[in-house]
Image (tube, rainbow, N blue to C red):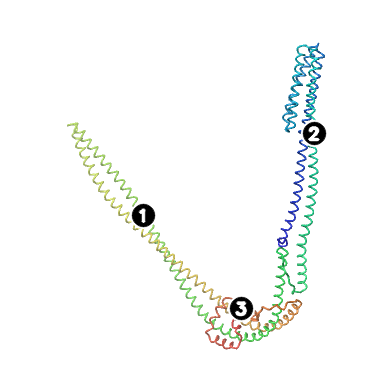
Amino acid sequence: MNISNLKIGTRLAAGFGIVLLLLLMVAGVAVSRIQNINAATDTMLEDRYVKVTLTRGIQDEVNVQARYIRNATIGAKDPAEVTTSLAKLDDSVQINGKALEKLKAMINSDDGKRQFAAMMEARTGYAQARDTAVKLLRDGKAEEAGQYVLKDLRPPQNKFFDSLKAMVALQEKMMQESAAEARNHGRVAIMATLVLSSIAALAAIVIGVIITRSITVPVNRAVEVARTVAAGDLTSRITVTTKDEIGMLLASLAEMNDNLKKIVGEVRHGTEEIATATTEVASGNMDLSSRTEEQASALEETASSMEELTSTVKQNGDNARQANQLAQSAAAVAVRGGEVVSQVVETMESINTSASKIVDIISVIDGIAFQTNILALNAAVEAARAGEQGRGFAVVASEVRNLAQRSASAAKEIKVLIGDSVDKVEAGNKLVSTAGVTMDEVVSSVQRLTSIVGEITAASREQEVGIEQINQAITSMDTVTQQNAALVEEAAAATSALQEQAGKLAQAVSVFKLDETASPSVAPVRTMARPVAAVKPAGKAPVRQLASVPRSAPAASAVKASAKANETEWEEF
């Protein structure tokens, strides 16, 4: 992979990344070695030295125990002295026991475990002999105890001392090994740091030189190309060999150089075409003058036709306004009719509600008559039971019963009549509702008709405004036509000035050096079309609409006949 094809930012990031990676490797190795040194130092201080201290402490306690036994033996005549010394001896034995347990927990190596086992075996013999001496002292046998200490206690005690010294020697040896290991880690760390730092520095120098050359060489080439173009030499060939930002810059400079070649070539050719075009423009100005006179005649005929069109449009506008007024009146009448129908619908609904209430009242009366009839029957039964005394009451009850039956019969007939009336009222209510819906549709249709007539009226007003604008445009066209004659004279003067400017432009672009392959791309017709297009915006849209009217007129025929000998491009005016 070519490094020059990478982006400058990518190259710089890769270079710094490699250097940073090497620095991280140096730091990692240094940290790793320092951690090894710390581990060895911790082992030496927290393990080996502690074991040596514990072992020596045990050795000191054994000496203390021997002193307590000696004191008890010497002061055997004083029971208090014996008791005190033996109590202190017991405390020392407890202290040694705890120290041995702690030492046992800290020993991990095989040599240490073997030495500790030998030490414990020697301690067992020493402890048995010590306990025997203590027993003799407790029993008051001081002389025997003294002889026992000299003959039987000292050998196991010395053996125990020897095992303790061996343990101290072993731990000191292991501590020296830990110190040697720490010194070795330190030397390795120094060497690794120096080697990796040298490699990182060399790599940084190499990467810096490579990246610098990959940037400065193309930049110098781009500066050389820019100076050549600034001096006016456009013949240089620019070769792009990379894809980075500088390669993109060279490609842009090459594109700029090619575009400048094309532009200068077109400008040179354009100056020649301008000289030719100015001559043709001069002859075209004469033709433009005759066409201007013909256009003025056509505008007069167009103005006459527009006056007739204006009067017709105004008459249509008046008719549309009258139709709009009639439609609005009809809409108002339809709206009032709809309101009346709505009131009739509400009245029919009220009648229907009242009829329903009357039916309910008749039902109540029918119920009362039925209950009265039952009461009359009960009264007749009671009168029959009363015999002669209830005969008059029986006559009255019979009359009441007849009256109740007549009331019930009349209530049923009224209920039938009222029900028939309710059905007819409901049928009438439906018909009135249908008439209301139909009336709403009529009102809606009349309103739509009013809206359409209103739109027609508005369109007629817009037509009147448009016709007035067209008249104004025709007046403006007449004014512009008069101005065109003056413009023809100004164009002749401008043509002479244009020829002079074309000469100056040719002299200005002559300082550029071009290849022989540079070809022009400007056509003479496009150069001539520019002065004609400058006249078109004067009339805007109304001018293009009016141009279609006089084509069938005699003036248009005269225009075509007079223009037959001219160039076809002038007919576009």
Location of the C terminus (image quadrant): bottom right
Quadrant for the N terminus in the image = bottom right
Amino acid type at circle 2 is Lys
What is the C-alpha distance between the residues marked 2 and 3? 113 Å
**Does 145 sit left or right of 519 as displayed?**
right
Q: Please identify the quarter of the rendering in which residue 484 is found.
A: bottom right
The picture places residue 372, in percent across and down from the top left corner, at 25, 39
Looking at the rendered structure, which numbered label has been put on residue 436?
Answer: none
Identified at 78% across, 32% down, the residue is 171
Q: Nearer the viewer, residue 303 or 265?
A: 265
Q: Is mark 2 in CB contact (under 8 Å) with mark 3?
A: no
* Number of residues whose C-alpha sits closer than 10 Å to that of mark 3, classed few (under 14), some (14–19) or many (20 or more): some
User: Are discs 1 and 2 less than 8 Å apart at CB?
Assistant: no
Q: Which residue is mark 2?
A: 173
Residue corresponding to mark 3: 536
* Chain-order first, disc 1 or disc 3: 1
Left or right side of 323 for 148: right
Q: Position of residue 198 (x, y in %)?
A: 80, 51
Residue 330: % across, % down: 41, 66
The amino acid marked with disc number 1 is: Thr
Query: Disc 1 marks which residue?
Result: 347
What's the distance in space between the residues labelled 1 and 2, CA to CA?
127 Å
| The quarter of the displayed image where residue 341 is located | bottom left
Instruction: State the image coordinates of residue 437 (x, y, percent, origin top left).
Output: 38, 59
Which secondary structure lies at badge 3? helix
Which of 570/243 is in front? 243
Q: Residue at x 24, y 40 (%)?
A: 373
The answer to which of marks 2 and 3 sits earlier in the sequence is 2
Question: Which of the two labelled residues, at mark 1 and mark 2, occupies the earlier sequence position?
Answer: 2
- Give neighbour class at mark 2: few <14, some 14-19, many 20+ (Cα, 10 Å): few
